[in-house]
Image: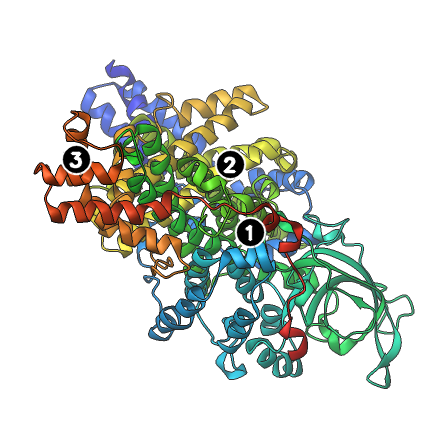
Amino acid sequence: MTAFAPFLFGVLAILVAAYLRLRLLPWSVATAVVIVGAGWLCGSGVLATVVPLALLALVAVPLNLAGFRRNHLSAPLLAIFQKVTPKLSDTEQIALDAGTVGFEGELFSGKPDWRKLLAQPKPELSVEEQAFLDGPVERLCAMTNDWQITHELADLSPEIWDFLKKEKFFGMIIPKKYGGLEFSALAQSAVLQKLMGASASLSSTVGVPNSLGPGELLLHYGTPEQRDYYLPRLADGREIPCFALTGPYAGSDATSIPDYGIVCKGEWNGANVIGVRLTFDKRYITLAPVATLFGLAFRMHDPEHLLGDVEDIGITLALLPHDTKGLEYGRRHFPLNAAFQNGPVRGKDVFVPLSQLIGGEKMAGQGWRMLVECLSVGRGITLPSNAAGGVKAGAIATGAYARIRKQFGIAIGRFEGIEEALARIGGHAYAISALSKASAAAVDRGEKPAVPSAIAKYHATELGRDVAKDVMDVHGGKGVQLGPSNYAGRSWQTSPIAITVEGANIMTRSLMIFGQGAIRCHPYVLKEMQAAAITDHATALRAFDRVLFQHVGFGISNAARSFVLGLTHARIGRAPGDAATRRYYRKLNRYSAALALVADTSMLVLGGKLKFKEKISARLGDVLSYLYIAASMLKRYEDQGQPVTDQPLLAWAFHECVWRMQMALDGVLRNFPLRPVAWLLRALVFPLGRREVPPSDRLGRRVAALLTAPNEARDRLTEWAYLTPSARNTVGRLCALLPDVIAAEPVERKFLKAAKAGELAGYDYAAQLADAEAKGVIDAAERTLLERVRAASFEFISVDDFDSADLGAGKRRDDHPRPWRDAA
């Protein structure tokens, strides 16, 4: 055995150096020292020491000689790389250049620096923003009747439209110098979450003008004249904006829009000017039926070369006032019974001058870049915020209902089947809440979070749909019967809308998350592509050589880290956190290394074909997503002061994330096309097999208990939810009753025990209560408590019923006044 000691210790030294990510020269020297030391200590003899030293030198010396390495190793590899690397299309290049890389880059590194995450400032509302949330937002929620909106008007009431304009809800992103509120992304998120508790139609109506649309585009690219004229009008609601991108032949493939504009001369405000004659057919455009200002994406052509030598100028964005001749709008789609305004926009030979192009003539052809640079912001705020608001309302309402609703003499929340659903609701609500806040915080730090916004949009809406399903299952018939008292049915009914809009979720998962993240977040791939694209060979070779061998070391390190952390089940390594969370950070270290290893190998082996392996790409995207969600939850936990009472929620959501990461990686390896490579990766990623499990029943019971009783963790979970117990807020009244229900439970147990024993006379509840008081089973105050709780609970276990005539099509009318038309 002593004869092999230098070799074995040398291998161990290489493994440790790779795990610690030592640079090439220190690694070479350290390994040599270990080999010599092992040979001397173990008395292995000269030959046993020289052989591993020679093998080390055979590898290390050429690598450490920069000139030799560059000319004999990097040069041929550069030639191969330039030949096999697929050229990025202009569309892909623009998408890559549009965003920035935040902490998701650390998660892709295989060795996250958690100090960067924990050093990020805690997201907090300003005094002004909190006052708006407590004032105008609270008043708006109180005046909202969602049943009237969705069933009777199919629209917001005129009073609500007026209030939205008066209080500048459409101007949250617009700077104060233009008359807007100039709120942070966090404040926008808080407002939308609270409004979502009152009405999804209301939240969507407010969200769209503050997301992708004319306001956002004008802020970044508008000419001074455009900003000075339009932004004040958008801020105070004189203009209602929409943005028309999607059409019958171009949905997800937005760069292939067939809508076109021909540069020509035409008449505008009595003058003959150069402009664009537009022909377009758009659909699914939110706010289009009531809009007064239309943003439009089209492909611009200049066949007469009035602007220059280029004929196909490219995708361009324009502003069309509602009274533009030939503009057709006003008809509505009917998206799954939702009442927010949505409809088609059409036009044929619609002329607008070049001054109506967003940014003017100089921004002609820059439309796709403009869109993708703004999409990453809007996608990360509106839909994740709406999802967070919806699941918070669902979580608190379902927890209270499960405590109030009794069957077989006990609250249904005590049944294990209901507990299981409540655990999913609570855990997913915790995850979505953290994810939404992380996305808003990234925007407020000045990032353009292209990859995180795709993660947030996809997973917040998907988990939100799962929560809506569980909410419906717990409520049973109460959730099925629509009516003014049903707070669950519309969320379930409309949940596919969020799944579909702003990039359909199937496309987002299959193409966008890993498709962008693999290049944007990887520390070396994009640099290698940029180096290979340099035209000067000597410069390209130097740049490529430097990055290539950093990449090689990166890959070896991730293989070592994945294997070691898998072998120890992530029980070693430095990590932040308290006693409850330190293990969580170590688990994320492990799966970060595994993701980096498998992603690197997939890109190396499959090359450009990986783009078409959508299932593998989607699963790798899932791993990156759950790493990001878990990191967001840990940041939320730290920001809130590591509250002990929140640990069951964090633990359930974290274990769910880690289990899903494991299954996603397993799915990649089971379906990897080159089986020997898959076997090797499995040995490195799962050296002891799969060991992660879903959250336990015991943990789920603790989460369910938090949702079914007032406590600090429940309050933190439902931050920014609309819970005022007003006449129109059923959820608020339901939650207000919960303390009395809990106080009545021990009295109810005494009463039910006597009733089951046959000690009480009477056939109905009232008679039995009277007899229980008379016989001393309960006293007068306890009887009063049970009567009050019984009467109050009846509202929340009841369902609505109608005369048949009240359910006819005539009750949904669309002929009420539209004051925004007159205002326009």
Hey, what amino acid is under mark 1? Ala
Q: Quadrant of the N terminus?
A: top left
In this rendering, does residue 578 appear at all? no
Mark 1–mark 2 distance (CA, rounded to whole Å): 29 Å
Q: Which percent across, then down, holds residue 533?
A: 65, 51
Query: Which residue position is annotated with label 3?
Result: 751
Q: Residue furthest top?
A: 1
Give the labeled residue for mark 1: 543
Q: Amino acid at mark 2?
A: Leu
- Return the x and y of residue 773 as percentages of the image width and height: 12, 41
| Front residue (pair 380, 539) | 380
N-term mark: 1 or 2: 1
Q: Which residue does the image show at 55% across and 36% down from the upper left?
A: 618
Label for residue 620? 2
Sort mark 1 into few (<14), some (14-19) or many (20+) by Cα contacts within 10 Å. some
For the view shown, which residue lies furthest in the left direction? 776
Tell me if 441 is positioned left or right of 4 in this view: right
Q: Which mark sits nearer the N-terminus, 2 or 3?
A: 2
In x, y percent, where is residue 434? Answer: 37, 51
Q: Distance of mark 2 from mark 3, alpha carbons?
A: 57 Å
